[in-house]
Amino acid sequence: MSILKEEILSELELARDVITKSDCSVVVIKYGKIWKKKKGEGLAPLIEAIDEMGEDIKESVIGDRILG
């Protein structure tokens, strides 16, 4: 498996763990670290995270309770 694939899978696993073990609705993972967590209902937390991070959200992994 390539390094990039391993990093992505690791970040996906971290996002899943954060979503399932906390009360946040959205988590943004980048470079193996949590960059943002949001709470709320519906798509609002996801849209807020995207708006707040702007261009920094590129190349990140986003975990969301609604979208999966």
Image (cartoon, rainbow, N blue to C red):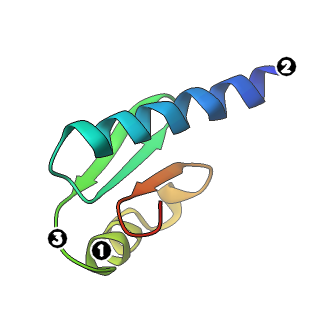
User: Relative to residue 17, is residue 7 drawn left or right?
Assistant: right
Mark 1 is on which residue type? Glu
Above or below: residue 38 compared with residue 9: below
Q: CA distance from mark 2 to mark 1?
A: 34 Å
Tell me the mark number nearer the camera, choosing from 2 and 1. Answer: 2
Residue appearing at x 53%, y 38% in the figure: 12
Which label's residue is closer to the chain start, 2 or 3?
A: 2
Q: In the rendered picture of this protein, how many numbered marks are placed on residues? A: 3
Residue ID for mark 3: 40
Query: Within 10 Å of the Cα at label 1, are there few (<14), some (14-19), or many (20+) other Cα atoms?
Result: some
User: Which comes before the other along the chain, label 1 or label 3?
Assistant: 3
Q: CA distance from mark 1 to mark 3?
A: 10 Å
> Helix, strand or loop at disc 2?
loop
Quadrant of the image occupied by residue 22: top left
Residue that badge 1 annotates: 48
Rate crowding at label 3 as few (under 14), some (14 to 19) or many (20 or more) other CA atoms within 10 Å. few
Secondary structure under badge 3?
Answer: loop
Image point 49% across, 32% down: which residue? 13
Among the 4 quarters of the image, the one containing residue 64: bottom left
Instruction: Specify whether 28 is left or right of 60.
Output: left
Q: Quadrant of the N terminus?
A: top right
Which amino acid type corresponds to the residue marked 3 in the rendered image? Answer: Gly
Tag 2 residue? 1
Tag in front: 1 or 3: 3
